[in-house]
């Protein structure tokens, strides 16, 4: 029986901690595997069921790329979207029996595509008589049983998240999302689900939801003073024993946290960002963990719990609905209770099936609205600009972002105490396929250039701090000796550094010597033709993710904030293009930085 919203709220209120309990109708018969029960000659009762999982859907319903306005495709020919996932889920439910399955998600649901953006900002779900969010509609129709909160759930503010929660027929779980004042769970920590077996003995499956502590940094403006986000291990250690004492036969954790044990925010928080593996290792009583956040594919990964020696299975399906995880459980009845005898995991590829027409038909009108929206013309461009080479060259398309950001900050500081200080700007290459065409420029072109909902800030930095900032950024490159061949496919992302954590800073000129080790690569750092004075003061136009400590860049999180804006940088770029009418790279593009080896340019 799907858990409707009213039932969920009533049970949450009754429990006092936001507990959801979902029952299932009688399951189809499952054949017993005959065996001896402790030598007494009785057949052992057995039961098998499957937990299906998705994560990091990021607003993908259709197999469609709104930034290119065509069917999604990548080098591996992956497909995306809940419509594809729905077909896979239907197939597994038919194979195993609908009531021998549960379907859960590990977060980052309502941000990422122009479809999800449109219903948060353009035609918002929070408006009076506003629409139902497409992700809620699709996930309700597919029949999700529970979903953990992701960090991107908070991007649009708590009111949008609460409205989305209200529209879902399943609970949004977050055991470590606490009310800042009461330190009580701000969302249901878990849901409990009963699976009826042919043996008259229900299996009780608890799903514990955990989200990412980095929310406190990345969405500080939206959550500060309202919610706090303690570590996953700490909260799992609190809740798993409770779930077991409440009669859970199986405990599954849905964690919006990668498995690597690493963090991108350094020592700004006493918690680990990617803690799923640590939870498995440190907290007894967990059978399986659905992993999210890291955007990596892990079909099956076992971690041994240090206290019990039990092997815990982890699985992370690839982002955007490209994969569906299957946790297959085999249980045996022993000493008056169900015991997990075996559990394994695998992933299914959504490119092997067609989209479910039930889902595409349900949201066809919303899709058409968004396609029309992103194709609105906002101006023209005199030349083609592309991010294809932006990870290793100073490209005009990144200069465009920096130019708009610097202009915006200069205007905001005009006439004030800091108006005379030089304004610099940072920007990253968020997508290697973004482009501004020659001729007409549309919303989708600008949105593809800046796919995140970041806002703009101004921070005060010294020359010395900027040098360290740039050195940290330059860790992105693989050390490449002078004279050796340069393969751009192997040049970047050193130490796993993603493209969005490499910043190009405009307003300065400098070289990045990739023959040198990380930490000593920035040479010829100059401002207006003279070496940068370590004591000189500059204003850095910076996105809120970086300013809040995202990527753990030095100095920026502690730097004095001179100004901040609630408008998304993407919308600022769109408005700038609309106001200009025509974009001419000759007006803002310049080569401010370049890669070198022993003083010789790489390109």
Image (tube, rainbow, N blue to C red):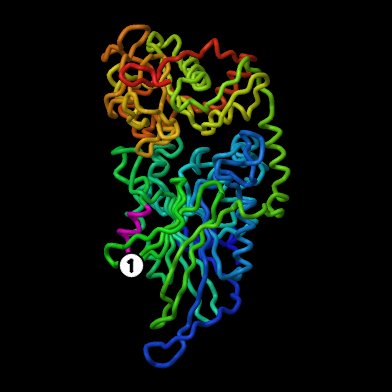
Measured as percent of width and height from the top left, residue 212 is found at 41, 46
- Quarter of the image with the C terminus is top left
Q: Which residues are drawn in magenta?
A: 276-284
> Which residue shows up at 45% across the image and 22% down it?
393
Q: Is residue 570 above or below residue 239?
A: above
User: Residue 583: which quarter of the image?
Assistant: top right
> Which residue shows up at 35% across the image and 15% down it?
538
Measured as percent of width and height from the top left, residue 82 is found at 61, 51
Measured as percent of width and height from the top left, residue 502 is found at 40, 29
Give the camera-side residue of 514 and 584.
Answer: 514
Q: Is residue 274 shown to the viewer in this render?
A: yes
Q: Is residue 507 left or right of residue 383?
A: left
> Which residue shows up at 47% across the image and 47% down it?
150
Q: Is residue 134 above or below residue 94?
A: above
Q: Please tell me whether mark 1 sits on a helix, a strand or a loop.
A: loop
Q: Is residue 372 left or right of residue 501?
A: right
> Which residue shows up at 49% across the image and 42% down it?
152
Asked if residue 144 is among those painted magenta in the image, a careful observer would answer no
Q: Is residue 567 shown to the viewer in this render?
A: no
Which residue, given by chain and number where applicable, does mark 1 sit on?
Answer: 310
């Amino acid at each position: 029986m799907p858990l409707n919203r009213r039932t969920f709220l009533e049970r949450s209120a009754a429990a006092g901690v936001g507990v959801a309990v979902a029952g299932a109708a009688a399951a189809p018969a499952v054949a017993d595997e005959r065996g001896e029960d402790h030598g007494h000659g009785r057949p052992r009762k057995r039961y098998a069921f499957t937990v299906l999982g998705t994560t990091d859907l990021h607003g993908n319903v259709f197999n469609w790329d709104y930034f290119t306005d065509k069917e999604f495709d990548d080098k591996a020919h992956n497909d995306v979207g809940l419509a594809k996932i729905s077909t896979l889920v239907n197939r597994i439910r038919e194979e195993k029996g609908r009531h021998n399955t549960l379907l859960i998600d590990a977060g980052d649901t309502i941000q990422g595509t122009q479809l999800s953006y449109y219903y948060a900002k353009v035609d918002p779900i929070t408006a009076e008589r506003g629409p139902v969010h497409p992700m809620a509609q699709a996930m309700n129709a597919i029949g999700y049983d529970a979903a953990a909160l992701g960090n991107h759930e908070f991007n649009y503010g708590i009111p949008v998240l609460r409205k989305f929660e209200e529209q879902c027929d399943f609970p949004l779980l977050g055991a470590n999302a606490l009310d800042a004042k009461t330190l009580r769970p701000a969302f249901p920590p878990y849901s409990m689900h009963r699976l009826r077996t042919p043996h008259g003995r229900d299996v009780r499956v608890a799903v514990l939801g955990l989200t990412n502590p980095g929310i406190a940094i990345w969405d500080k403006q939206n959550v500060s003073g309202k919610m706090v986000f303690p570590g996953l291990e700490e909260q799992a250690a609190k809740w798993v024993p409770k779930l077991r004492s409440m009669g859970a036969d199986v405990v599954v954790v849905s964690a919006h946290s990668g498995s690597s044990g690493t963090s991108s925010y350094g020592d700004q928080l006493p918690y680990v960002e990617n803690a799923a593996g640590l939870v498995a290792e440190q907290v007894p009583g967990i059978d399986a963990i659905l992993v999210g956040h890291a955007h990596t594919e892990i079909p099956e990964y076992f971690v041994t719990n240090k206290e019990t020696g039990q092997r815990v299975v982890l699985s992370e399906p690839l982002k955007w609905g490209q994969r569906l995880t299957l946790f297959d459980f085999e249980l045996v009845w022993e000493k008056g209770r169900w015991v997990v005898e075996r559990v394994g995991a695998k992933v299914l590829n959504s490119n092997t099936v067609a989209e479910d027409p039930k889902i595409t038909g349900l949201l066809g009108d919303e899709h058409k609205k968004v396609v029309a929206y992103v194709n609105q013309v906002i101006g023209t461009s005199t030349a083609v600009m592309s991010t294809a080479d932006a990870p290793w060259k100073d490209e005009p398309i990144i200069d465009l972002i920096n130019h708009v950001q610097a202009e915006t900050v200069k205007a905001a500081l005009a006439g004030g105490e800091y108006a005379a200080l030089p304004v610099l700007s940072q920007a990253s290459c968020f997508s290697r396929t973004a482009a501004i065409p020659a001729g007409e420029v549309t919303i989708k072109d600008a949105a593809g250039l800046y796919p995140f909902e970041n806002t703009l800030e101004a921070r005060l930095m010294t020359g010395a701090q900027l040098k360290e900032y740039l050195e940290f950024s330059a860790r992105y490159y693989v050390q490449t000796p002078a004279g050796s061949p340069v393969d751009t496919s192997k040049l970047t992302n050193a130490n796993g550094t993603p493209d969005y954590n490499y910043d190009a800073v405009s307003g300065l000129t400098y070289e990045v010597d990739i023959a040198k080790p990380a930490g000593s690569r920035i040479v010829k750092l100059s401002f207006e033709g003279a070496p940068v004075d370590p004591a000189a003061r500059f204003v850095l136009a910076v996105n809120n993710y970086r300013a809040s400590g995202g990527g753990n860049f030095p100095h920026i999180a502690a730097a004095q904030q001179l100004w901040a804006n609630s408008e998304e940088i993407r919308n600022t770029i769109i408005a700038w293009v609309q106001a200009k009418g025509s974009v001419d790279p000759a007006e803002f593009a310049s080569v401010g930085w370049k890669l070198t080896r022993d003083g010789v340019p790489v390109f």
